[in-house]
C-alpha cells in the first residue's frame, strides 16, 4: 500500500473514525438502560398518582364519608371505610417508593455521565472526540427530557364534611403534551412546541455531529457551524418550551394548586447545557482540534 505522500493526498488522522472504546460502549449501554428505566418509572409514578388521587375526587370522598358513617353505626362490622384507608396508605407508599427509585436512577445517570465525560476530557481535552461525546450525552438527555414527565400539577379544595378533595391532576411529558394539544386541535400551540422542543434541539445536535464528523472537510464543517449559529439564535426557545408547558398545565387549574417538576425538566436543562458547551467548543475550534 502506498504511503499518503505517494498518492498525492493529504493524510489526516481522524480520531472520531476510530473504533469506539469498550468504556464508551459500556457507558452508552448502561446510560440508555437507565434512561429507559427513568422514563418507565416516571410513567408508572404518574399512574400511581392517578390511582391515589382517584380516591379523593368529590364522588369518592362522598362515598367515603358515607362508609365512615355506616362503620360507626355498625360498630365496625361494616369495614369499607377501613378498606379505603388501607388502599390509600398502600398507594401512597407505592408512590413514595417509585419516586425514590426514579430519583436514585437520575442521580446514577448524573454521576455516570459526569464521570464518563471527565474521563474522556482528561484523555481528549483538546480533541474533537470529547466534543463528540458531549453532543452524544446531550442527545441522551434530550431523549429522556422529551419523554419523561416534566411537570405535575394537582388542583384541590377543602370541602366541609368531605375534607380534602382533588379536582384535577395532570402530569405530562413534552411529547405527550404535543400529542394532547394536537388531539384537541390546538395546532398552533402543538406546532410551536414540536418545532422549538423537538425539531430545533435535534437539528442543533445533528449539525454539531456533522461539524465534528466533518473534521478534515473544511467546507462541510464551516457550513454546519454557520447553520448551528443561525439555529443557536433560537436557544432561548428552551426557556419558551418550559414556559408554554407551564402555561398549558396551569391554564385550567383553579382553587389551590400544588405543582412539582419531574425528571423531564432536569434532563431537558442538562441537554441545553451540554449542547451549549459543545457548540462553544466547535465555535472556538477546540472541538475539531
Image (cartoon, grey):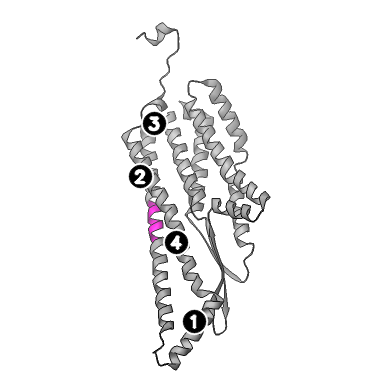
What percent of the width, then of the height, locates residue 121?
Answer: 39, 35
Q: Work out how far the residue at label 3 is from the one at label 4, CA to CA, in angstroms.
A: 40 Å
Which quarter of the figure is the N terminus placed in?
A: top left
Q: Nearer the viewer, mark 3 or mark 1?
A: 1
**Residue at 56% of width from left, 21% of height from top?**
219
Q: Which residue is mark 1?
A: 64
Q: Up-down: is 221 above or below 89?
A: above
| Distance of label 3 from label 1 (alpha carbons) | 63 Å
Residue contact between numbered discs 3 and 2, judged by CB atoms under 8 Å = no
Q: Main secondary structure of the magenta part?
A: helix
In the image, what residue occupies the spot 59% across and 50% down? 241
Using the image, tell me which numbered label, if any, was put on residue 45: 4
Mark on residue 124? 3
- Mark closest to the chain's N terminus, 4 or 1: 4
Is residue 219 on the magenta stretch? no
Query: Which residue is identified by label 2?
Result: 30
Q: Going by the image, does 116 lie left or right of 156?
A: left
Q: Where does the magenta region start and end?
A: 99-107
Q: Nearer the viewer, mark 3 or mark 4?
A: 4
Few, some or many C-alpha atoms within 10 Å of disc 1 (few <14, some 14-19, many ≥20)? many
Outermost residue, left side: 22
For residue 277, which numbered disc appears in the image? none
The quadrant of the picture occupied by the C terminus is: top left
Residue 143: x and y, percent? 48, 45
Query: Could you give the CA–CA distance between mark 2 and mark 1, rounded to whole angstroms?
Result: 46 Å
Rendering coords of residue 25 (x, y %)? 35, 37
User: From where the camera sits, is residue 286 visible?
Assistant: no
Corner quadrant of residue 29: top left
Amino acid at each position: 500500500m502506498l504511503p499518503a505522500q505517494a498518492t498525492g493526498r493529504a493524510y489526516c488522522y481522524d480520531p472520531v473514525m476510530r473504533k469506539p472504546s469498550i468504556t464508551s460502549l459500556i457507558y452508552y449501554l448502561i446510560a440508555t438502560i437507565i434512561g429507559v428505566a427513568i422514563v418507565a418509572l416516571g410513567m408508572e409514578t404518574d399512574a400511581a398518582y392517578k390511582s391515589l388521587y382517584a380516591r379523593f375526587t368529590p364522588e369518592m370522598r362522598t362515598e367515603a364519608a358515607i362508609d365512615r358513617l355506616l362503620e360507626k353505626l355498625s360498630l365496625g362490622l361494616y369495614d369499607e371505610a377501613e378498606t379505603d384507608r388501607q388502599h390509600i396508605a398502600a398507594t401512597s407508599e407505592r408512590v413514595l417508593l417509585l419516586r425514590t427509585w426514579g430519583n436514585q436512577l437520575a442521580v446514577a445517570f448524573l454521576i455516570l455521565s459526569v464521570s464518563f465525560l471527565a474521563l474522556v476530557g482528561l484523555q481528549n481535552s483538546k480533541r474533537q472526540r470529547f466534543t463528540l461525546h458531549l453532543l452524544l450525552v446531550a442527545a441522551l438527555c434530550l431523549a429522556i427530557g422529551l419523554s419523561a414527565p416534566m411537570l405535575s400539577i394537582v388542583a384541590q379544595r377543602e370541602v366541609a364534611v368531605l375534607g380534602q378533595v382533588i379536582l384535577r391532576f395532570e402530569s405530562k411529558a413534552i411529547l405527550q403534551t404535543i400529542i394532547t394539544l394536537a388531539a384537541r386541535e390546538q395546532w398552533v400551540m402543538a406546532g410551536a412546541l414540536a418545532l422549538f422542543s423537538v425539531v430545533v434541539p435535534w437539528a442543533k445536535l445533528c449539525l454539531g455531529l456533522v461539524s465534528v464528523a466533518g473534521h478534515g472537510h473544511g467546507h462541510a464543517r464551516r457550513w454546519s457551524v454557520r447553520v448551528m449559529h443561525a439555529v443557536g439564535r433560537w436557544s432561548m426557545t428552551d426557556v419558551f418550551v418550559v414556559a408554554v408547558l407551564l402555561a398549558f398545565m396551569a391554564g385550567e387549574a383553579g382553587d389551590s394548586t400544588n405543582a412539582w417538576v419531574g425528571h423531564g425538566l432536569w434532563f431537558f436543562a442538562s441537554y441545553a447545557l451540554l449542547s451549549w458547551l459543545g457548540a462553544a467548543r466547535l465555535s472556538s475550534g477546540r472541538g475539531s482540534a
